[in-house]
Amino acid sequence: MTQVYGIILAAGKGTRMNSTKPKVLQILSDKTLLGHVLSQAHQLCSQVHVVYGFGGEQVKQTINDNSINWVEQTEQLGTGHAVAQAMPHINDDSISLVLYGDVPLIKQSTLNNLVTQAQKSGISLLSVILDNPTGYGRIIRDNNQIQAIVEQKDADKEQLAICEVNTGIMAVESGLLKTYLSGLDSNNAQGELYLTDIIEIAVNDGKTIASVITKNEFEVAGVNDKVQLAELERTFQKNQATKFMQQGLGLKDPARFDCRGTLNFGQDCEIDVNVVIEGDVSLGNNTTIAPNCVIRNTKVGDNVAILPNSVIEGAIIGNDASIGPFARIRPQANIGENAKIGNFVEVKKSTIGKGSKVSHLSYIGDSTIGAKVNIGAGVITCNYDGANKHQTTIEDGAFIGSDTQLIAPVTIGKNATIGAGSTITKDVPEDQLSLSRSKQTTLKNWQRPTKK
Ligand code: UD1
Ligand code: CA
């Protein structure tokens, strides 16, 4: 197999983003624009060269990919000049695949097709047919064969009427590409070295340009401002939602669902509106997620109900559990089978045993809670002394009365009962009632103060 080298043009500043970040570092779903292009390029290229200019250090640091050969283009003298910067690093007998750091949704199948075509004919070009071709280079054909590309600013009236445009993406035998690039000049409206001019040079060299026309205009859409960024984000999300639904995921409204990462799911899962999935999330079978939930890096079991407005991160949720509404489950929370975490409950770095309930207004941190424990409303594990975190252990079957503070480190024995309103500072024995409560008194002659 011929080696394929990727050349990704990423030198542009992206002024219209109005951002301190270089354009290619803008985020689409869970990755930078350049990151999307890189993940496609890495799949078929033995090496990837990124031509950078503006904000180079920031780009290199953010991308943080040691396999990339970074090539600096100090002055932006045109797309032909940009590609030429990478050529000294590329063997003549390989295929060069030219990509753009701001065209994130390019598909692997299209690139494979282009490369295959270039292996046969020496050069292949990806074009698209647009209703409004304004701004793009037009594809000039004769007898259906591609002859040249004419840029908008260099085109005559007849050429401007052509709707087939250059995407910029092409694959060329590297030896040929080097020769053609050395023949470029800047005698054009923009005074630049146009990569597009190599097409006419190749035709004059007796080559037939292999043509690939994509039907999917989003695949070749570049991002120049935040409006276009949002459009591509929607396209990306819509495509992903379609794929999930085809695999059996129920989405109440695919336009109000976002997955910025990977989602795996079993059968009969249903997701209601305004749910955001981030990182690596998996759902078992028959699990439902109610509106307005954010779930990140979490493994959710079978038959789980995640009720509205819950935020879950870095957790494991066991089968048949119920979470929320308005629950916050934080990293290293392990919610057992059939457990219930109710409204305004925060759980962090804690294990909640099988069938245990924390139903209302609690903070559970750094705790190990056994099976069939009942935590009353407003119970707080006081895990932090201002300097260190301490553990709370609650053994199976314990009942913690409402509004109890458990001052960690502390252990509550099996089947113990804690009276409501207690402040527990010492370990509590099994099976018995423990409480700390000042005696209730009534003052006989007390009167409400009156306004003076
Ligand atoms: C280019 C094509 C045009 C095509 C269009 C598709 C040329 C001459 N024209 O036009 O036919 O329809 O893309 O979007 O190639 N870049 C560099 N260094 C440079 C110049 C450009 O890295 O010196 C990068 C830019 O950051 C950008 C990309 O190359 O990502 C395209 O450059 P741009 O100047 O925007 O070309 P267009 O005018 O859009
Ligand atoms: Ca452009």
Image (tube, grey):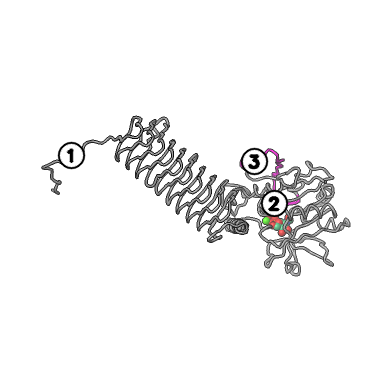
Task: Give the extent of the magenta segment.
Answer: 59-80
The local secondary structure at tag 3 comes to helix
Q: Is mark 2 within 8 Å of ligand 1?
A: yes
Ranked by sequence position, the earlier of labels 3 and 1 is 3
For mark 1, does the 10 Å Cα neighbourhood hold few (<14), some (14 to 19), or many (20 or more) residues? few
- Label 3, on which residue? 60
Disc 1 to disc 2, C-alpha distance: 78 Å
Ranked by sequence position, the earlier of labels 3 and 2 is 3
For mark 2, does the 10 Å Cα neighbourhood hold few (<14), some (14 to 19), or many (20 or more) residues? many
From this viewpoint, is residue 272 visible?
A: yes
Q: Residue at x 26, y 36 (%)?
A: 437
Q: Amino acid at mark 2?
A: Tyr
- Label 2, on which residue? 100
Q: Nearer the viewer, residue 30 or 251?
A: 251
Between disc 3 and disc 1, the foreground one is: 1
Can you give x and y, in whole percent of width and height, for residue 429 in the image? 35, 31
Can you give x and y, in whole percent of width and height, for residue 211 in the image? 79, 60
Q: Amino acid at mark 1?
A: Thr
Contact check, label 1 and label 2, Cβ < 8 Å: no
Task: Please state the quadrant of the image where ligand 2 appears.
Answer: bottom right
Q: Amino acid at mark 3?
A: Lys
Q: Residue at x 43, y 50 (%)?
A: 324
Can you give x and y, in whole percent of width and height, for residue 95 in the image? 80, 48
Disc 3 to disc 2, C-alpha distance: 16 Å
For mark 3, does the 10 Å Cα neighbourhood hold few (<14), some (14 to 19), or many (20 or more) residues? some
Q: Residue at x 44, y 44 (%)?
A: 355
The local secondary structure at tag 2 comes to strand
